[in-house]
Amino acid sequence: MTTRVAIFISGGGSNMQKLVESMTGAHPARPCLVLSNVETAGGLEIASAAGIPTVAVSHKPFAGDRAAFEAALTEAIAPHAPDLICLAGFMRKLTAGFVEPWAGRMLNIHPSLLPKYRGLDTHARALAAGDALHGCTVHEVTPELDDGPILGQATVPIAPGDTPETLAARVLTMEHRLYPEVLRRFVAGEGLPVRLAA
Ligand code: GRF
């Protein structure tokens, strides 16, 4: 049985693109939907060009009513019957009301070596801390932000002279390797956590 994967994005969707490109041939999953909370997200065009159904559900009309926004998300994804949700550059916090029914069936990629640097500005924070090693993590999504069981990590050495931008670019390259590998093994029920090094 093929696992149907919905991918949530907010922007360019480079992680989404790598996930979509990986789900071919003998891969046990296929993308069934790309959803964005930003109607102009570049990733929506990329997904459409790849023949994947897309939908935009803006959070703006709900003006902070998270439950109403999440009800709209649930309504939008229902016709596509996903088995699994991959958050990939999705920049909205999801409440327990949305996350708990997806327990064990929702993944996220975060640009730090969790549990270090939950939240935003992870590259700048790693640089400010003088860390030698940084990276990215794929984890199961739980109601606590960036806190669920770790399914894979990729490490990226911090180089002299790195800026948040140069570091982010190297981390993103590893995200593109890590997320597809974690997804494949997660769906196949094999060999987790994934450990990669730049
Ligand atoms: C990436 O840095 C990722 O770590 C974070 O969102 C950023 C943009 O991702 N979650 P994408 O290019 O939209 O996949």
Image: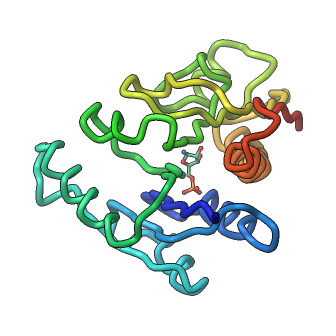
- Location of residue 65 in the rendering, given as x and y in whole percent from the top left corner: 11, 44
Residue at (42, 27) in percent of width and height: 145
Residue at (75, 65) in percent of width and height: 22
Q: Say left or right for 141 vs 73.
A: right
Identify whether 140 is placed above or below 179.
above
- Location of residue 139 in the rendering, given as x and y in whole percent from the top left corner: 59, 33
Quick one: quadrant of the N terminus? bottom right
- Location of residue 97 in the rendering, given as x and y in whole percent from the top left corner: 24, 36
Q: Say left or right for 132 vs 186.
A: right
Using the rendered view, name the quadrant where residue 28 is placed. bottom right
Residue extending furthest toward the front: 1
Quick one: quadrant of the C terminus? top right
* Towards the viewer: 108 or 61: 108
Residue at (32, 39) in percent of width and height: 94
- Location of residue 162 in the rendering, given as x and y in whole percent from the top left corner: 76, 33
Identify whether 98 is placed above or below 177.
above
* Towards the viewer: 104 or 34: 104
Q: Say left or right for 13 vs 36.
A: right
* Towards the viewer: 178 or 26: 26
How many badges with numbers are in the image? 0
According to the image, what is the colour scheme of the structure? Answer: rainbow
Residue at (77, 32) in percent of width and height: 192
Residue extending furthest toward the right: 198
Q: Say left or right for 38 vs 15.
A: left
* Towards the viewer: 90 or 157: 90
